[in-house]
Image: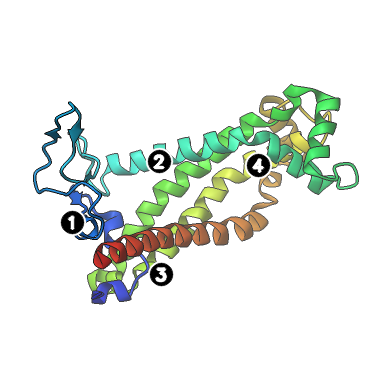
Amino acid sequence: MAISENTRHSLFPSYLYSSSAYSKTLDLESFQRRNPSLPSTSPSPTPTPLSNGTVSSKSFLIQSPSEPARKIEMYSPAFYAACTAGGILSCGLTHMTVTPLDLVKCNMQIDPAKYKGIASGFGILFKEQGVRGFFRGWVPTLLGYSAQGACKFGFYEFFKKYYSDLAGPENATKYKTLIYLAGSASAELIADVALCPMEAVKVRVQTQPGFARGLSDGLPKFVRSEGYSGLYKGIVPLWGRQIPCKSICLIIFVLEFIIVNFCAAYFLASQ
């Protein structure tokens, strides 16, 4: 199987960022020749009625999803707005949904003698605070990770293009993997600045009983006790956790597509 020169220089296949629409037809004729019991294929996608009234398909067609009538131009203001909105929905809602698990995790880290495990942690929280206690701190979680998602997705696309333009067309293709990783790290750097204040209030509300009911009274109380600078005490550890994590997530996400694409190509070539 021939591999283009551009593919050798990057882990990121160009089709991931292609906006062209196309249809894929999976040819099964050679496979069915080896399996005569299967119905034969035909170039025509028109179903053929059988004597018993049923319909037999003559071909196996896989179509890509059709593009919307109104397209968003790549790297336009509408494109960045769409990425930002997607980040808000994907990060904010998912992190808010797992607030109970995050609550137990934070308390296990603060008081391991009391919270010895996940199951016992849920039991202690239910006994002391009831079901409502499982979602303590959900507002700063939703707002903080929505802001993080907006910056992460929006700035990733911005920095990806910015660094590619700085490198020039030839180097942008040759070092695409490094450029995209740099874009991911730069976006996460900004995203964590947006997240850190809400994360600080969230952890204090979740792990210090009686500190506050939520964000509305927790944020003013936090600022009065530690000042605005206290909201960013954990920014360096947050960077140390999030930047490598998100860079690795990007690599694994792309490698997954590469593996799936390779397996599909190998399957088709073997028929």
Using the numbered discs, state the Cα–Cα distance from disc 1 to disc 2 in whole angstroms.
45 Å
Can you tell which mark lies on residue 199?
A: 4
| Left or right of 154, for residue 125 | right
Identified at 18% across, 37% down, the residue is 56
Using the numbered discs, state the Cα–Cα distance from disc 3 to disc 2 in whole angstroms.
23 Å
Residue 33 spot, x, y in % from top left: 20, 58
For the residue pair 215 and 157, the one nearer the viewer reads as 157
Q: Quadrant of residue 100?
A: top right
Residue 13 in sight: no
Query: Dot 1 surroundings within 10 Å: few (below 14), some, or many (20 or more)?
Result: some
Query: Dot 2 surroundings within 10 Å: few (below 14), some, or many (20 or more)?
Result: many
Residue 55 in sight: yes
**N-term-proximal mark, 2 vs 4:** 2
Q: Which residue is mark 3?
A: 178
Q: Nearer the viewer, mark 1 or mark 2?
A: 1
For the residue pair 62 and 121, the one nearer the viewer reads as 62
Question: Element under label 4?
Answer: helix
Residue 108 spot, x, y in % from top left: 80, 45
Q: Quadrant of the C terminus?
A: bottom left
